[in-house]
Image: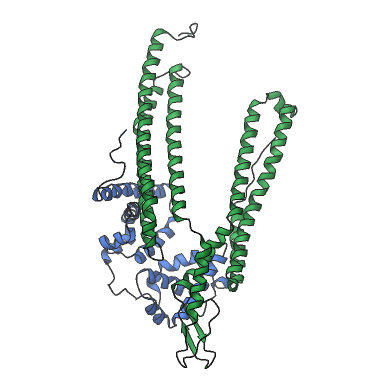
Chain colours: A blue, B green
Amino acid sequence: MSQNNPLFEPIHGISLFDYSAANAKLANGIGVDTICAALGVEIPVWEDASQGWTQRMQEDSDFIVITQMGTYFAQAGEHPKLGHLQPAAGAGNAANLQRLATDRYFYEELCGARTAAYEAGMDGARWIQTNYGISLGDFQEVAMQWMQQQSSQTTEETLEYVNYMDAKRQEYARKFADENGGNIADDVDF
Amino acid sequence: MGLFNRGQSKEDKLQTEAIQSELAALESRLDNFLTKLNDRVDILIEGFIAEAPAIMATDDRFGQAYYRFASGMKGQATNMREKVREVLETQIEPTFSRYTDTLPVGTDAYRLVHDWRHRCADKANTWEDQLQHRVDAATEQVERKDYEPIFRDMVNQYLQQCKSIHCTQCGDNLQITQVYYHSAYVACPSCNTQNIFEPGVIARDLEQNARKLAEQRSKHFMDAHEQKRAEEEDLYQQMHTLQLKMSFQELQSKSGPLYAQLLALNKQRVEAENEIPAQLDKYYRNIFDELNALLPDLKEHHEKFFISLQNNYKQYDSKRSVNL
């Protein structure tokens, strides 16, 4: 697929897989120095390549680069040079991460909770990190995996997950509101 | 069966009056409920507008604190919207179903219940539209910035900072005059040593702010585009109203003064419709012309970006199918 397309040519030797996996690791809190050392490049080279890949995505009206980036992002753990990198704080809660990747309802629940947290004025990504030990990068990596599976789902299955997520969003919204002294219109009744 | 008695019987009248009274009471409760919610919307929006500037002033460069604050405000608006939806689902719809399941179709009482449901739904929809409009307007008011001085100051600060960058080998000034948006190798003009120049946060944010400035300078084209869109929609509605006034004969024969008026309206509508994509094109082209002027070294990328963007928005060009 990408062999003959100039949009997939590596930039300064940094391939789209390198770039995507590096971004997954950066989102996980790994420093740019560590990424560059693992890729064997200096920061200016990485940053110029990084800007180049951003520009390629902007110039690609068919979205094939960004789509492929999503696939590679989900495969960051398999990258030969970057896959093993873990943030200094450790790998997080491995059991929860494993559950997130295998239990679709758990994933939808946390998506709903994250939205509810943002709607309550909180940092939703941090809430997941604090309560489940799953970093933003790991969460997004799993989200990409589920998104790829979405294309083979039936409409009924998609609707089931959407409804489940929204029910969880409302459940967590009530919980967060209770913790924060309620919503502004809680006492307005019909 | 009442075939010869098309007027309402006394019992029917009494029943209709009883229904009317119940529906009026519910509608009045809905009005009061929406009024009370509006008072809370006032408090929410006023608080948001008053507190946002202080949050923005001490925020990080990504605006995360403001993002959370604005999300919280929108979350409260969502909560109120859901309360209204819940009232429609638990109070209005069950009442409507209770009567329409038993009342004979075509009776005054049936029409009364139908009109009442339509009115209640309309009130809820109008309230939701107004809420959305107020949230959008408040957000726009809070986030509005004049990017002219912001961008000018950023460029000046960057150039000022570049004057004091020296070679790590010989100490000579690197004489940086171009914009580096990220870390870059810069050769010393005296000893040719490759220095790693870290341009800092200002340079990293230049491109994004240039984009905002270019959008700001091009806004009049977007306004014209939206105006043309509204104009086309209005002319289409005028045509629809006119068609409803026309007799079947006029419509069939495609003649008469009203038909001529219809054609004239359609001519205006087509002109407006053709202008919609043209104005959008002007808007995006102007953005990229401005960007080329602000950041000339990125001109090649800007042009490719413009073509990509244009390919995308042209996919959504569509014309109304009007059969006259």
Q: Position of residue B84 (x, y in %)?
A: 37, 37
Q: Residue furthest top?
A: B4
Is residue B37 toward the left or the right of residue B108 in the image?
Answer: left
> Viewer-proximal residue, B48 or A75?
B48
> Viewer-proximal residue, A121 or B86?
A121
Q: Position of residue B50 (x, y in %)?
A: 37, 51
> Viewer-proximal residue, B269 or B222?
B222
Residue A16 in sight here? no
Work out whether B240 lies above or below A132.
above
Residue located at (38% from left, 38% from top)? B38
Residue located at (39% from left, 56% from top)? B53
> Viewer-proximal residue, B196 or A3?
B196
Work out whether B295 lies above or below A175.
below
Residue located at (38% from left, 68% from top)? A27
Work out whether B203 lies above or below B83.
below
Quadrant housing the C terminus of chain B: top right
Dividing the picture into quarters, in which one does residue B168 lie? Answer: bottom left
